[in-house]
Amino acid sequence: MGSPLLRAWRGRGLRWAVAVVLAVCAGALTAATVSRAEAARAAYGETALVPVATADLSVGDTVGAGDVATRPLPVGLVPEGAATDPVGRVVTEPVAAGEVLLERRLAGSGTGVSALLGPGRRAVAVPLEAAPGGVIVGDRVDLYSPATATTSSELAAAARGGGGVRRVAAGALVVAVDDRSATVSVTGTEAAATAQAVLDGAVAVALVAPG
């Protein structure tokens, strides 16, 4: 059995041994974690924190705090133009869950059509009859007008002949659709030519395939 002093000494020795074992295990776990991190860096390079969508986002949606998470991504895999502060901004192109949020897919904050306009963009309404059937908000379209046409019939004639037709706006985002018109976002330099084509009654809208 031993004396009380010997038993106390043995108890302290046991506790000390347990503490040593735990310290060794913790050190081994830390070393393994560091080793895995080093191996990941060696395989993928340095990482950067990027905003990633946690849910599908549609054109016109406002990015909420719960719609985005910051996650590490190997620097070599980070797409160019990752957004720096996406919360509160409006989506101008569909974003799938898990995608990195990009500046080019986001406009400023606010509501309505103006929220979908990027810097330097203009909203111009074109007759819905000039657009393909079923065009919706979020579609991308090209706008065409004949160089010398003043009426829709002249536009059609020029298109059949394949001459005198010019593209006045490229990849314009459809930001609103009603019973009579589709409102598109064009650059400042495209706005005048687009407006003139609309006033001339000689504008054609071509739907652009995604991607």
Image (tube, rainbow, N blue to C red):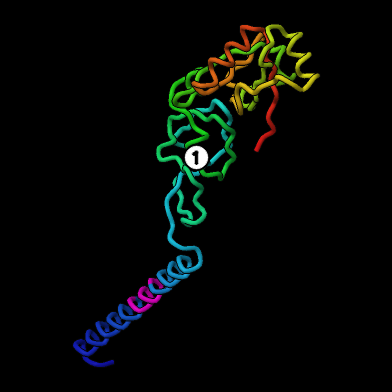
Does any portion of residue 178 appear in the rendered image?
no
Most extreme residue toward the bottom is: 2
Q: Is residue 109 above or below residue 67?
A: above
Quadrant of the rendered structure where residue 145 is? top right
* Left or right of residue 62, residue 159 in this image: right
Q: Is residue 117 above or below residue 31?
A: above
**Front-most of 159 and 88?**
159
Q: Examine the structure image and report whether residue 182 is included in the region drawn in magenta.
A: no
Q: From the image, tell me which residue sits under label 1.
A: 102
Q: Residue at x 70, y 26 (%)?
A: 207
Count up the numbered dots. 1
Q: What's the magenta bit mostly, secondary-structure-wise? A: helix
Q: Is residue 64 above or below residue 159?
A: below
The residue stretch that appears in magenta: 23-30
Q: Residue at x 52, y 44 (%)?
A: 100
Q: Residue at x 61, y 27 (%)?
A: 170
Q: Examine the structure image and report whether residue 27 is included in the region drawn in magenta.
A: yes
Residue 196 in percent (x, y) is at 59, 11
* Left or right of residue 73, residue 25 in this image: left
Mark 1 residue crowding within 10 angstroms, few (<14) / some (14–19) / many (20+): many
Does any portion of residue 130 appear in the rendered image?
yes
**Front-most of 135 and 17?**
135
Residue 150 in percent (x, y) is at 68, 7
Amino acid type, residue under disc 1 in the picture: Leu
Which corner quadrant holds the C terminus?
A: top right
